[in-house]
Structures are given as structure tokens and as C-alpha cells.
Amino acid sequence: MAVKGKTAFVGDGESILVFRAAGADAFPAEDESSAKEILRKIAKEYQVIFLTEELALSLGSFLKRFDEQPYPVVLAVPSKNGSTGFGEQALKSAMERALGVDILFNN
């Protein structure tokens, strides 16, 4: 069972630096392979995992396995390079799937 409210950040070293500096659990992953390995290791320990959009985009089919369980919730966030729009689209799709309507973006 995951510890209530435990959160992690996974992404390239520069993108997660600010979270690590603030004392958050942050794991550097420079490519798809290292990100998969880290996610496998931390999935049972964390309830929410923030993953940079570039990595989330490349791990699309791998991340679908997390949709089948309540935890962890894996959310794509912009990296140091800015947003690609992937995280917003993924959140919108998840909300529509869960609720049947778009309550966040009204599109």
C-alpha cells in the first residue's frame, strides 16, 4: 500500500533540479529506458508521480498500465523546455474518460 500523499518527480536532471532543491523526491531520467526502470521501482511507493512531457510522450503505451489501478497517478508536466501540450491533452482525456465530460477546459 502506498504512503498517503507521497509524491515524486521524474525527468531530466535540469527539469527536476528545482524540486530536488526544495526537498522533494526527484529522480533523474535522461531517456525512455531509465524512466521505465525508475517508474517500475517507485510505482508502489508513491501515489502521485509527475513525469516530464517528453518522457511521458515516449512512454505512452508503457504508462497505460497505470490507468488500470488507482495509484500511482502519473501526470505529465512541462520540462525545462516548456510545454508541448501533451500533459494538458492527457489530463483532458483522463477527465473525459472518468466523468464523461470536459470540466476543465470546456472544449
Image: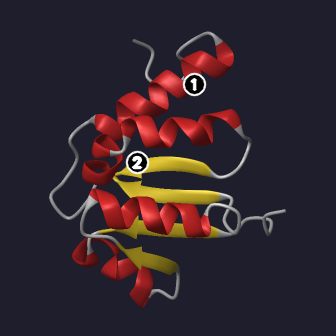
Quadrant of the frame with the N terminus: bottom right
Which of the labelled discs sits on residue 55, or is there none? none
Please tell me how many numbered marks the rendered image carries.
Answer: 2
Left or right of residue 59: residue 72: right
Residue on which disc 2 sits? 76
Chain-order first, disc 1 or disc 2: 2
- The three-letter code of the residue at mark 1 reads Met
- Residue drawn at the location 54% of the way across and 69% of the way down: 8
Residue on which disc 1 sits? 95
On screen, 24 above or below 77? below
Crowding at dot 2, Cα within 10 Å, few <14 / some 14-19 / many 20+, comes out as many
**Where on the picture, by quarter, is residue 18?**
bottom left
- The three-letter code of the residue at mark 2 reads Ala
Crowding at dot 1, Cα within 10 Å, few <14 / some 14-19 / many 20+, comes out as some
Quadrant of the frame with the C terminus: top left
| Residue 104 seen by the camera | no
Left or right of residue 40: residue 27: left
